[in-house]
Structure formats: C-alpha cells, structure tokens
Image (cartoon, grey):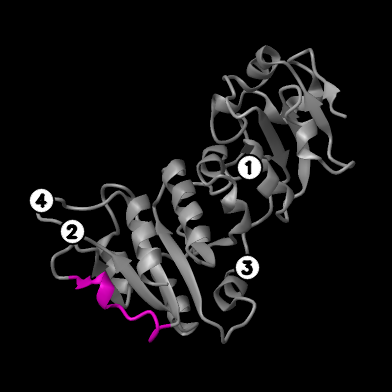
C-alpha cells in the first residue's frame, strides 16, 4: 500500500517538487534529472517501458489502483499537499518519476533491429516547443514511425510537457541526436533512407506522389512552428514535398503536418 505524505517538504517526494519551475531543476544541465510522467494511462505506459520507475505519487486510491510492483516506492497525499509539492493543481491524479535513459546510438537507430527491413524516422530541426514535440511523438508511435532524430537545438523529448502531451508514448520511441546538422543527413542516405523535407513551397512535389513502397526506408524532415525547415536542411534532403491545401491556407501546424505525413508515407 502507498505510504501517506503529509509534509510537502518530505524528501521522499523530492523528485516532484516545484515541477512548474521549468524543464530541469535550477542549476542543472539541460536533459538531466528525473523523467516526470503525469496521468494514469501515461504512468501505465511508463511501467511497460524500459525506464526504471523511481517513485509514484498521487491522490488516495489512485496509486493503489495501478497495481505497482513491490519494488516501486509508492506515496499518496491529499490534493492540497500534492498541489503544494508539485506547484500546481494536478488534474490527472497521479505523477511518477523515472530514471532518464541516454539517447540511442545513432548508427543503431538508423539500422534498426533488422538493417534490411523497412523503416521510417521523423527528423526534427530546431523544434524547441516541448508540446509540439510530444504531439509529434504520439503521432509517430500511432502511425508506425520507428524513431526520432533531433538536431542539437530541439527540445528535450523527455521533458515533462513532452511526455504529458505524448500521453507517455514518447517513452516507447527511441531517439538520437544528429550533431552535425544538416550535413549529418548524409548518414541517413548512406543507410538507405529517402529524406523527405516538408515545406509549403509551391515548387515542392505533392507529398502523395512520394511512393513509400518504392522507398521502404524514409525519413520525414520537419522544422519548427513558424519558420519551418531552413533552406540548408531542405537542400540536404533528397525530396522537398508539400501537403496539398486549399488556397489561402499557407500551412498546417507542425504537429498536424507530421501526422499527415506519417499517415501518407505508411
């Protein structure tokens, strides 16, 4: 049974203290610290993932209903103590912390379990909005994308808001950083990928004309909301493609565009 927390300063729930402060505790480097997961469905996905759970905290009844393994520290607190610990009102009733895992090895991610098998990746450039990244990760898992490649400017895919918007699905999606950007895209070409850069430009080909069956290994390039992909990234890709839209609409949001592209290139 969960242990009861009555003091918001209790060190047993230190992982959850002041979660609204930002993407990491003050004074620590980006991409460090515990992974924070909110909500019952997301915590259930965490339990099924390779991430080691550090602790679970929630309102009475919610934590016990999860059926946690005996080795997972479990705590419960009333909604007022819980809110004081985390710094805001948690509507999802439960929150968990887990040890962070390092990014995947880039070559292993490109090759996949079977280097001869079809494979699809999402490649993100300067996508620094955590919620957009989480939404893209959720669509990627739902629509059969096998992994994420991030340029060095992207948001942390394990930041709390990314995990929350992905509904925990990002925990099942391997990711790696492509440090040499965009020249590093040649590594994808060497591994047999067709790189498809999404752009609303009028001279781009129709996304529906890209034959996914003829290119069993594809990588979809997506840029940040607003500026989109840089000219350098578009030039480094093998294909520039656009999603056909009604006249007067210049583009979709990046998360919606990602979902359309993933579904089109299945």
Mark 1 vs 3, N-terminal side: 1
Q: Which residue is mark 4?
A: 248
Question: Which residue is at 30% across, 78% downward?
Answer: 210
Instruction: Give the left or right position of residue 192, taking residue 43 as reference.
Output: left
User: Is residue 209 in the magenta section?
Assistant: yes
Q: Which residue is mark 2?
A: 245
**Callout 1–callout 3 Cβ contact below 8 Å:** no
Instruction: Give the left or right position of residue 241, taking residue 71 as reference.
Output: left
**Callout 3–callout 4 Cβ contact below 8 Å:** no
Question: Which residue is at 42% across, 75% downward?
Answer: 218
Can you say whether 37 is above or below 13 in the image? below
Marks 2 and 1 sit apart, C-alpha to C-alpha, by 35 Å
Q: Position of residue 8 (x, y in %)?
A: 73, 15
In the orientation shown, which residue stands out farthest toward the left? 247
Marks 1 and 3 sit apart, C-alpha to C-alpha, by 28 Å
Mark 2 vs 3, N-terminal side: 3
Q: Position of residue 139 (x, y in %)?
A: 46, 56
Q: Which residue is mark 3?
A: 105
Marks 3 and 4 sit apart, C-alpha to C-alpha, by 43 Å
Q: Quadrant of the C terminus?
A: bottom left
**Magenta region, residue range:** 204-215
Residue 7, quarter of picture: top right
């Amino acid at each position: 049974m969960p242990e009861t927390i009555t003091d918001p300063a209790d060190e047993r729930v230190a992982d959850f203290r002041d979660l609204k402060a930002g993407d990491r505790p003050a004074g620590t480097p980006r991409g460090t610290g515990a992974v924070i997961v909110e909500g019952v469905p997301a915590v259930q996905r965490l339990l099924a993932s390779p991430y080691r759970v550090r602790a679970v905290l929630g309102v009475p009844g919610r934590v016990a209903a999860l059926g946690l393994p005996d080795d997972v520290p479990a705590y419960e607190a009333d909604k007022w103590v819980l809110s004081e610990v985390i710094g805001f009102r948690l509507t999802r009733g439960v929150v968990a912390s887990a040890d962070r895992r390092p990014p995947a090895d880039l070559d292993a991610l490109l090759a996949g379990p079977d280097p001869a098998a079809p494979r699809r990746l999402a490649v993100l450039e300067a996508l620094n909005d955590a919620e957009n990244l989480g939404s893209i990760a959720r669509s990627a898992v739902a629509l059969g994308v096998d992994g994420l490649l991030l340029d060095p400017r992207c948001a942390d895919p394990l930041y709390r808001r990314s995990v929350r918007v992905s509904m925990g699905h990002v925990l099942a999606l391997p990711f790696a950083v492509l440090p040499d950007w965009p020249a590093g895209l040649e590594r994808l070409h060497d591994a047999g990928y067709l790189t498809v850069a999404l752009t609303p430009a009028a001279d781009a080909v129709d996304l529906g004309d890209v034959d996914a069956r003829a290119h069993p290994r594809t990588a979809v390039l997506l840029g940040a909301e607003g500026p989109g992909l840089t000219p350098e990234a578009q030039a480094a890709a093998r294909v520039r493609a656009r999603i056909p839209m009604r006249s007067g609409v210049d583009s979709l949001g990046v998360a919606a565009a990602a979902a359309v592209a993933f579904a089109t290139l299945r």
